Image (spheres, rainbow, N blue to C red):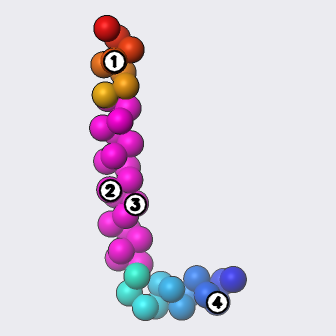
């Protein structure tokens, strides 16, 4: 499993993974803010 992960990173997909992580974090922030505004009303 570790070898497969190392091969995955070496293929350049690490950048794609990092971008996906950042987009996921931003999406979580938007959903949290939206939910808090709904509950506050």
Say which element carries label 3.
Answer: helix
In terms of secondary structure, where does tag 2 sit?
helix
The magenta-colored residue range is 14-33
Query: Label 4: which residue?
Result: 3
Q: How far apart are marks 4 and 3 (CA)?
A: 22 Å
Give the mark toward the camera: 1 or 2: 1
- Extreme residue toward the top, this view: 41
Of labels 1 and 3, earlier in sequence is: 3
Disc marking residue 23 = 2
Query: Which one is in front, 34 or 7?
Result: 34
* Residue picked out by circle 3: 21
Predominant SS of the magenta segment: helix
User: Which residue has dot 1 on it?
Assistant: 38
Q: CA–CA distance between discs 1 and 2?
A: 23 Å
Screen quadrant of the N terminus:
bottom right
* Label whose residue precedes the other's in the sequence (1 or 4): 4
């Amino acid at each position: 499993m570790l070898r497969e992960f190392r091969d995955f990173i070496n293929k350049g997909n690490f950048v794609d993974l990092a971008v996906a992580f950042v987009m996921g974090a931003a999406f979580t922030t938007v959903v949290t803010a939206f939910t808090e505004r709904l509950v506050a009303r």
